[in-house]
Amino acid sequence: MVLAIDLINLMIIISVKYVLLSGIEKDMKRITLPLFFFLAFLFPWAIWGTSIAESRGLLAFHIPQSLAFWIGLNLATYLTAAVTGGWPAVKDLLVRLIRWRVRPVWYLAALTITGLLSLAAVAVHLALGGTHQVGVLISAQNLLPSLLFQIFFFWLTEETAWRGFALPRLQAKFNALNSSLILGALWGLWHLPLVFIPGSFQSTLPFGAFLAATLAMTIITTWVFNHTRGSVLVAAVLHAATDVTIAYTNVMSASPRLFWIFVGLQAAFAILIVVTQGAEHLAKRADFTETATAL
């Protein structure tokens, strides 16, 4: 089903691409990022809006929320790539999707960073006299299936958009830190409609705090991304491991104190990356050279 949706998206994109005049295409390249972010907000927010309207009795139905990712975000990404960059931009995106040959240490880092931060946060919380229970939101036996599904999900949706498409183009204009701050702010704001959907994770958190956590996580993800030659797959592993770990350890839902300890540790780790790796690339190795190439 997912591949069928992607094929349909590509067919639409290619059709639009070849009816454009070359002069128009050249002008469109100048607004690649504004167009992408506009569409990336427009399509998913329209889909999520039906859930908000239904919860308030304004509609008798809603569009499945997952389609905001599978169709809304993917359509925004591939459509912008095709219209502003043609086949080379689409090809670059697809190459990033299948780039898996990176140093194993980065897979290990992607899988464990949030786990280590969560354990540290729980340890501090317990040392201050708090109590805590893990496995409330997700059981231990469901960790691996959940992780594998979310890697697949984020690999073909969010990470394709935010890291595969947007981040390299931002880094062609700004340094890695500023690119991360811009992307993190927009990525966090992108989740805003979920605050108004009953039952969503974002509806249970102060949105400002969620935004702060997103900014820190974006810096961490850029650090990993720039050390893996722009691998969308490794970014998806990090994203999935973060969400599954947070769900299992319950560090963002159990208590306000534990939540802020965890977010503080995330921020501290992000600052450590900036101080030790440098704001220009968030990396000391030359692995970022392909990452920062904009089409």
Image (spheres, rainbow, N blue to C red):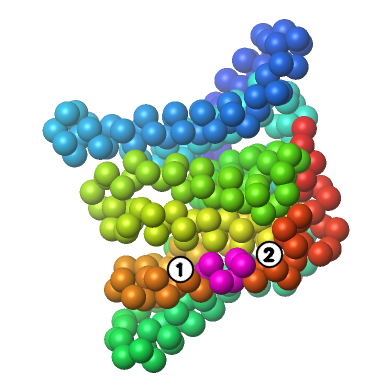
Give the residue type at disc 2. Val
Q: Residues within 10 Å of mark 1 (few under 14, many from 20)?
A: many
Instruction: Residue 228: give x, y in percent of width and height.
Output: 75, 58
Q: Are marks 1 and 2 in contact (CB under 8 Å)?
A: no
Residue at left 65%, top 24%? 31
Q: Dot 2 corresponds to which residue?
A: 274
The reply to whether residue 248 is visible in this rendering is no
Label 1 sits on what residue type? Val
Q: Please give left or right for residue 150 compared with residue 53 in the image.
A: right
Of mark 1 and mark 2, the one earlier in the sequence is 1
Mark 1–mark 2 distance (CA, rounded to whole Å): 17 Å
Please determine whether, in this image, residue 265 is positioned above or below residue 182.
below
Range of the magenta residues?
Answer: 266-271
Mark 1 highlights which residue? 263
Identify which residue, 66 or 290, lies in the foreground.
290
x then y, percent, for residue 216? 54, 61
Q: Residues within 10 Å of mark 2 (few under 14, many from 20)?
A: many
Taking 62 as reference, is 243 above or below it? Answer: below
